[in-house]
Image: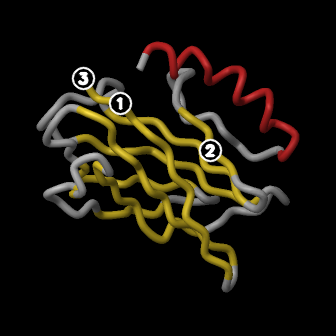
Amino acid sequence: MKILAALFPILLATTARANCPLDLGHGTGWVIYSSHYLVAFRPEPMRIEVGQPFSLLLNVCTKSNSPAELVAVDAQMPDHRHGMNYRPSIVAGTDGRYRAEGLVFHMPGRWELSIDVRAGEETERLSHDIILK
């Protein structure tokens, strides 16, 4: 996780041309993007522990600098063919900011985080792998 956190400034510089407000505090997190959307997110607490609940703070926007809607957040372990034992809830903030609460990675390994976003009628799924030890 330290390596991924160290990459954040590089990713921020790469995606800054979209002028999406990516600062989620603490100077760390991840940015994922597609041809239409940017999603900045970080866990709270900052360290994800096996079997412990955590939240994700997210900022979701389009590449044209407009807030987008967070539709769903989920995670699964593709190598084990199962997902989380809990369904996270989403709390909307303002200007594309969200908080997904109640995530629990109940075992170590590779988790694929899925983030569904939309602006208007167009919905897209962005994903990011998290390795939990």
Contact between marks 1 and 3 (CB within 8 A): the answer is yes
Who is closer to the viewer here, 101 or 83?
83
The quadrant holding residue 84 is bottom left
Q: Residue furthest bottom?
A: 121
Q: Quadrant of residue 76?
A: bottom left
Describe the element under mark 3 as helix, strand or loop. Answer: loop
> Between residues 41 and 26, which one lies in front from this camera angle?
41
Dot 2: element: strand
Q: Residue at x 61, y 69 (%)?
A: 124
Residue placed under numbered mark 2 in the picture: 32
Colour scheme of the rendered structure: secondary structure
* Up/down of 50 relative to 19, above or below: above
Whole-Å distance between the Cαs marked 2 and 3? 22 Å
Left or right relative to 27: residue 11: right
Mark closer to the chain start, 2 or 3: 2
**Residue 110 screen position, x and y as percent:** 32, 37
Callout 1: SS: strand
Residue at mark 1: 131
**Residue at image mark 3:** 133
Amino acid marked by disc 3: Lys
Tell me which residue sits at (35%, 30%) in the image: 131
The CA distance from mark 1 to mark 3 is: 7 Å
Q: Nearer the viewer, mark 2 or mark 3?
A: 3
Distance between the alpha carbons at the discs numbered 1 and 2: 16 Å
Q: Quadrant of the C terminus?
A: top left
